[in-house]
Image (cartoon, helix red, strand yellow):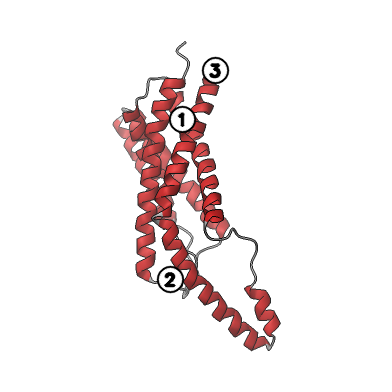
């Protein structure tokens, strides 16, 4: 029980630190780009709904299509929700990462934790983005369920492949490891409907992908190194 508490306390502390830090990084990076993309998305929606209203001959119907559900207002409210979501996400990922580190049953320094973070970055960000790159608002995409299934499968397969390479000395294990990592990409990610294009300019989309990759890299580097360091200090000695 004390060992579990040390994992929990370490994960909460790491989540608070990393979630807060990554919100600052997002504020100067991805959030600014998303805000710009939303301008193009709303303009495209307005044009679409206006044309629908002209086709049906009902301005009221066009107005109803333009209505959307509740969303936080731009500014402090939206930033507060982003901060809360980032902290909760960081705590959740930290529980998984610190829990896996603790299963090793060995002393893990912040340097080794950094390696764990880089492995997680490769599994959760780099591998899935080869088939499903980060998307701006207004970007056409495949059905959500299909994307989620492929994303989860890719992350798990990549993590399992990296683990086989890292924790097995037998050279022949390289074959199933590479097969696991490659399998999701051989199957292929679900694709967006043919003929549809994003509403935001291509340059904005490229900048967003680059910013998202940098943000994810910072996130996992901090999560791995801080998670290992703080857990090492908090874990029971006996």
**What x and y, as percent, mark residue 26?**
42, 52
Q: Which mark is residue 218?
A: none
Q: Give the image location of residue 90, x and y in percent.
A: 49, 40
Identify the residue at horizontal 49%, vertical 37% (top origin).
16
Q: Horizontal and vertical percent for residue 196?
A: 47, 74
Q: Which residue is mark 1?
A: 98
- Which numbered disc flags the more N-terminal residue, 2 or 3? 3
User: Where is residue 211 drawn, in percent x and y?
Assistant: 36, 55
Give the residue furthest to the left: 171
Give the distance between the C-alpha atoms of the residues marked 2 and 3, in whole angstroms: 51 Å
Residue visible at 35% across and 50% down?
214
Kindly report which numbered mark, 2 or 1, lies closer to the viewer in this rendering.
2
- Choose between 39 and 115: the one closer to the eye: 39
Say which residue label 2 marks: 200
**Is 31 rendered above or below residue 3?**
below
**Number of numbered markers:** 3
Residue farthest to the front, as pictured: 76
Q: Residues within 10 Å of mark 1 (few under 14, many from 20)?
A: many
- The residue shown at (42%, 60%) is 32
> Is residue 132 in view?
no
Q: Is residue 237 above or below residue 169?
A: above
Q: Earlier in the sequence, mark 1 or mark 3?
A: 3
Q: Which residue is mark 3?
A: 2
Whether residue 159 is situated above or below residue 42 in the rendered picture: above
Residue 86 showing in the rendered view: yes
The secondary element bearing badge 1 is classed as helix
Spatial distance from mark 2 to mark 1, Cα to Cα?
Answer: 38 Å
Closer-to-camera residue (91/22): 22
**Helix, strand or loop status at disc 3:** helix
């Amino acid at each position: 029980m004390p060992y579990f508490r040390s994992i929990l306390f370490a994960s909460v502390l790491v989540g608070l630190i990393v979630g807060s830090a990554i919100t600052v990084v997002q504020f100067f990076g991805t959030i600014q780009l998303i805000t710009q993309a939303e301008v193009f998305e709303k303009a495209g929606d307005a044009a679409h709904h206006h044309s629908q209203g002209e086709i049906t001959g009902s301005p009221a119907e066009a107005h109803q299509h333009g209505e959307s559900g509740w969303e936080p207002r731009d500014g402090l409210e939206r930033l507060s929700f982003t901060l809360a979501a980032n902290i909760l996400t960081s705590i959740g990922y930290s529980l998984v990462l610190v829990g896996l580190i603790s299963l090793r049953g060995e002393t893990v320094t912040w340097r080794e934790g950094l390696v764990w973070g880089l492995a997680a970055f490769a599994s959760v960000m780099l591998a899935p983005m080869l088939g499903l790159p980060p998307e701006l608002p207004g970007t056409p995409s495949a059905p959500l369920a299909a994307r989620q299934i492929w994303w989860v499968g890719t992350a798990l397969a990549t993590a399992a492949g990296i683990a086989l390479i890292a924790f097995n000395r037998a050279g022949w294990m390289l074959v199933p490891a590479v097969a696991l990592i490659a399998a999701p990409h051989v199957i292929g990610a679900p694709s967006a409907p043919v003929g549809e294009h994003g509403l935001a300019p291509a340059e904005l989309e490229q900048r967003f992908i680059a910013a998202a990759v940098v943000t994810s890299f910072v996130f996992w580097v901090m999560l791995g190194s801080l998670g290992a360091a703080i857990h090492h200090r908090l874990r029971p000695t006996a």
